[in-house]
C-alpha cells in the first residue's frame, strides 16, 4: 500500500474548492466586481509607494511572484539528500500564511479531527503547537527529544506511532526552540523513510523558523529539508520571514509541501490573508539582488556575534554550559547556584533582575523539559550584546549572593 493523502486530510476539507473571484479571470478595466471603495484609501496623505500599492483593492490571493522568488531561493541550495533527478520546488508546493503561526493552525485544521486525532510533539519545543492543538480540541502526545543532544528519539517516536493510530501529525522544530539545535537531516529522512515504508497515515512537520542561522550563507548546500517535499509526500516544512529576514512585523509564513497537500491548504486559507503591504515588503526582501544579500549579511553578523557572546558568558562565574546547540539566532545557557548546580531559582532571579532594574530582557526557560536553570538569549547587535554581558555579570553575582 502506498501513502494516500486522501486518507490523511479530513473528509470535509477534501470537498473544498479554492475560493474564486472575478479578478482571477479579469484584472484590468473599470473594476466594479469586488465591492471595493474605488475612490481610494481614507488617508489624507499617501506616499508614492503607497499609491502604487492600490490599498483600496483586495490583495492578490495567489502571490505567484513572491512564491517564485522563495522557491528559487531554496532551490539554489538543495539539501544533500535531494538527487539531481529529483524534482525541484515549484510555486505549487507553497502555501503562504500570516506568520508560521497561521500555518501551524491550518495544518491542524486540515488533518486532525477535533476530539479524535492527536498531534505528537517532542519537548522541549515551541509553545504554539500546544496552544493551537488545544484550541482545535486535538490531544497532544509527547515524546521528548533525546538528551543531551536534543535529537529525535526514533525508537520512541515510531513505537508511539505503532501503538496509536490516532496520531496524525508529528511536529519537530529544527533548529529547535529553545534548544537552538538542528535535528540531523539524516534522522528526518530516516523518519520519512519509515513513514513511507509503513504507509503511515500522517504528516511529519519540520518547523524551520531558524534554519538560516545553522551555517554560513556561503555554503553550497543547505541543511533545510524544504527542498525534499517533492520527494517525500508526508513531509511538510514551515519557514518564516520573522527571523533571518528580520520581518516579524509583516507576518509572513511559508508552508512547503506536496502539490496535492498545497492544493487543500490553499483551498482552506482565507483568500486575502497576505496583505498588499506584506507581499510588497516580502517581494523586496526575497529579491536576489537586494533583500537576499542583506539577509545574508545579517546572518553572518549574528553567527559571528553568537560565538563571541557565548564565549563571554561561559567565562562568567555562575554560568554553566551551553545547554543547546549553535544553530539559531539565540543561545540557551545554564545558570548555576553557589554549589555550581543548575538552578531555576537563580536563573529566574537573574532574569527578573535584568528586566526589572536593568532594562535587559531575556527569556527564562528553566521549566522546559531537560532545561533546568536555562535562560534563552537572542543574539543582538554588537552594541546590545556588550550591554547584555556587562549587566549580566553584575546581576548574576548579585543574585547568586542573595538566593
Ligand atoms: C519554532 C518557531 N516557529 C514559529 C515561530 C513563529 O513564527 P512566525 O513569526 O512566523 O509566526 C516561532 C517564533 O518564535 C518559533 O520559535
Image: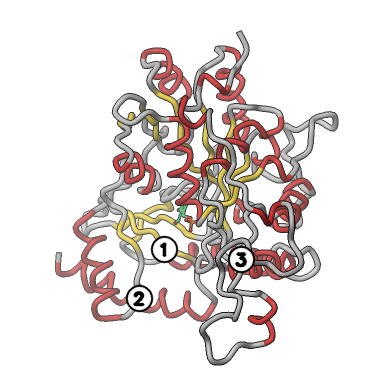
Q: Residue furthest right?
A: 85
Residue 136: image x %, image y %?
33, 39
Residue shown at the point (36%, 44%) measured from the top left = 132
Query: Which corner quadrant of the image does residue 272 belong to?
Result: bottom right
Classify residue 40 as left or right of residue 72: left
Residue shown at the point (55%, 80%) measured from the top left = 41
**Disc 1 marks which residue?**
377
| Between 393 and 194, the one nearer to me in the picture | 194
Classify residue 273 as left or right of residue 301: left
Residue shown at the point (35%, 76%) measured from the top left = 360
Residue 127: image x %, image y %?
35, 48
Residue 136 bears which disc, if any?
A: none
Q: CA distance from mark 1 to mark 2?
A: 10 Å
The residue mark sitting in front, 3 or 1, is: 1
Residue 198: image x %, image y %?
55, 12
Crowding at mark 3 (Cα within 10 Å: few <14, some 14-19, many 20+)? some
**Disc 3 marks which residue?**
304
Residue shown at the point (46%, 57%) measured from the top left = 331
| Between 345 and 157, the one nearer to me in the picture | 157
Q: Do callouts 3 and 1 mark residues in contact (Cβ within 8 Å)?
A: no
**Disc 2 marks which residue?**
360
Amino acid at each position: 500500500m502506498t501513502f494516500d493523502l486522501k486518507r490523511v486530510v479530513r473528509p470535509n476539507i477534501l470537498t473544498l474548492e479554492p475560493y474564486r473571484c472575478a479578478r482571477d479571470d479579469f484584472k484590468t478595466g473599470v473594476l466594479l466586481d469586488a465591492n471595493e471603495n474605488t475612490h481610494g484609501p481614507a488617508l489624507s496623505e499617501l506616499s508614492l509607494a503607497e499609491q502604487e500599492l492600490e490599498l483600496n483593492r483586495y490583495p492578490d490571493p495567489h502571490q505567484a511572484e513572491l512564491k517564485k522568488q522563495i522557491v528559487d531561493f531554496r532551490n539554489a541550495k538543495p539539501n544533500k539528500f535531494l538527487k539531481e533527478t529529483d524534482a525541484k520546488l515549484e510555486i505549487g508546493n507553497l502555501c503562504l500564511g500570516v506568520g508560521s503561526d497561521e500555518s501551524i493552525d491550518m495544518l491542524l485544521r486540515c488533518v486532525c479531527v477535533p476530539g479524535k486525532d492527536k498531534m505528537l510533539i517532542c519537548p522541549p519545543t515551541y509553545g504554539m503547537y500546544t496552544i493551537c492543538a488545544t484550541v482545535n480540541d486535538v490531544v497532544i502526545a509527547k515524546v521528548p527529544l533525546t538528551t543531551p543532544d536534543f535529537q529525535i528519539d526514533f525508537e520512541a517516536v515510531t513505537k508511539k506511532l505503532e501503538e496509536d493510530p490516532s496520531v496524525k501529525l508529528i511536529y519537530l522544530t529544527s533548529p529547535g526552540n529553545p534548544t537552538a539545535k538542528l535535528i540531523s537531516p539524516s534522522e528526518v529522512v530516516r523518519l520519512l523513510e519509515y513513514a513511507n515504508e509503513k504507509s503511515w497515515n500522517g504528516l511529519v512537520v519540520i518547523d524551520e523558523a531558524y534554519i538560516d542561522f545553522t551555517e554560513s550563507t556561503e555554503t553550497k548546500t543547505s541543511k533545510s529539508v524544504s527542498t525534499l517535499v517533492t520527494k517525500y509526500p508526508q513531509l511538510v516544512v514551515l519557514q518564516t520571514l520573522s527571523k533571518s529576514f528580520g520581518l516579524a512585523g509583516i507576518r509572513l509564513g511559508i508552508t512547503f509541501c506536496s502539490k496535492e497537500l498545497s492544493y487543500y491548504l490553499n483551498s482552506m486559507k482565507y483568500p486575502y490573508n497576505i496583505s498588499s503591504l506584506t507581499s510588497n515588503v516580502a517581494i523586496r526582501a526575497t529579491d536576489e539582488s537586494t533583500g537576499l544579500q542583506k539577509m545574508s549579511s545579517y546572518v553572518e553578523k549574528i553567527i559571528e556575534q553568537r560565538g563571541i557572546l557565548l564565549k563571554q558568558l561561559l567565562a562568567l562565574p555562575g554560568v554553566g554550559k551551553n545547554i543547546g546547540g549553535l544553530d539559531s539566532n539565540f543561545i540557551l545557557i545554564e545558570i548555576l547556584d553557589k554549589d555550581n548546580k543548575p538552578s531555576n531559582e537563580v536563573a529566574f532571579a537573574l532574569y527578573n533582575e535584568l528586566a526589572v532594574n536593568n532594562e535587559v530582557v531575556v527569556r527564562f526557560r528553566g521549566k522546559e523539559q531537560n532545561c533546568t536553570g536555562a535562560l534563552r538569549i537572542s543574539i543582538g547587535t554588537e552594541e546590545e550584546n556588550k550591554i547584555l554581558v556587562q549587566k549580566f555579570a553584575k546581576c548574576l553575582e548579585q543574585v547568586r549572593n542573595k538566593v
